[in-house]
Image (spheres, rainbow, N blue to C red):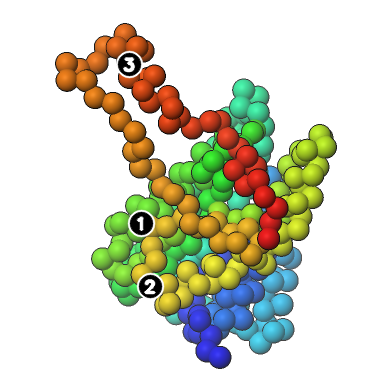
Amino acid sequence: MSKSLQDKVIIVTGAGRGIGREIALLCAAEGAKVVVNDPGGAADGAGSNAAPAEEVVEEIKKRGGTAVANFESVAEAIPASKIVKAATDHFGRLDGVVNNAGILRDMIFHKMSVEAFEAVIKVHLMGSFYVSHAAARIFREQESGSFVHFTSTSGLIGNFGQANYAAAKLGIVGLSKSIALDMGRFNVRSNCVSPFAWTRMIGTIPTETDAEKARVEKIKQMGPEKIAPLCGYLLGDSAKDVTGQIFGVRMNEIFLFSQNRPIRSVQRSEGWTPQSIAEHGMPALKGSFYKLDRSADIFTWDPV
């Protein structure tokens, strides 16, 4: 059986643990040479530790694969560019980037600090930009490449206490679509994946009520290894016509998410006033309003 990523060079950020680790292991098993990037910080981004990335590299080598560890942070432009340089220095090329690195600083909005908001934006949104931007020039010159970015239903649908995370994750959707549009002429693809999986970041979810405890128990059933196959597919040549899309993975389910489009309109030939909007415009639109749903309100069935 042929390997879908044979001899490709893939960067996986945040690959020391959880979903990133499983993606790195799968890419290596599919024949890729992998840059395992992870500074080894805590779930909130504090500290550093070389061990997580080094252990994944050792595991890949033990299984007969090829990998190198990298400990740079994605949250600043120059260190992020060094992740891309590590790929070209060690392996001479670059074929795919998985922007998986992330941190959480959850807090109800009015109590959220500026620092907590900015820190999450820096890692998730700016980090995805910095690494992608450094890789884009290589992809442009060789006229090939694939980006896989990680979004979340916190941004796509909604969740409590995650304004920073939701803003970053929805921003990544816009970033991915723009890359797909701008770089499609160079055979460069860009897609988003929204994962449902138990990781140490999800382990920071509050479990104070019975409902919250039950929700977390369901999430624990969803191993991070379930996310990796779709990412491996999107990085491979068999996905050459797949770009600009948003996918979700939950256990053995794969979802294609909708994207923002107009759903209803009202028109008035003489134009609008605040009064006529109140009397006519808004009542006509109100039947199509979205409720303040959270992810759990939409995904109401157990993982399968």
Q: Would you say 186 lies left or right of 132 here?
A: left
User: Of label 2 and label 1, which has the lower sequence position?
Assistant: 1
Q: Quadrant of the C terminus?
A: bottom right
Picture quadrant where residue 139 is located:
bottom left
Residue ranking furthest to the top: 275
Identified at 49% across, 47% down, the residue is 125
Q: Which residue is mark 3?
A: 280
State whether residue 74 is above or below residue 30. Answer: above
Q: Would you say 151 lies left or right of 287 here?
A: right
User: Of label 3 and label 2, which has the lower sequence position?
Assistant: 2
Element at badge 1?
Answer: helix
Q: Which residue is mark 1?
A: 179
List x then y, in percent, for residue 208: 82, 35
Dot 3 alpha-carbon crowd within 10 angstroms: few under 14, some 14 to 19, many 20 or more: some
Q: Which residue is mark 2?
A: 240
Dot 1 alpha-carbon crowd within 10 angstroms: few under 14, some 14 to 19, many 20 or more: many
User: What's the residue type where badge 3 is placed?
Assistant: His
Q: Would you say 209 lies left or right of 55 here?
A: right
Q: Quadrant of the N terminus?
A: bottom right
List x then y, in percent, for residue 299: 62, 47
User: Of label 1 and label 3, which has the lower sequence position?
Assistant: 1
State whether residue 260 is above or below residue 77. Answer: above
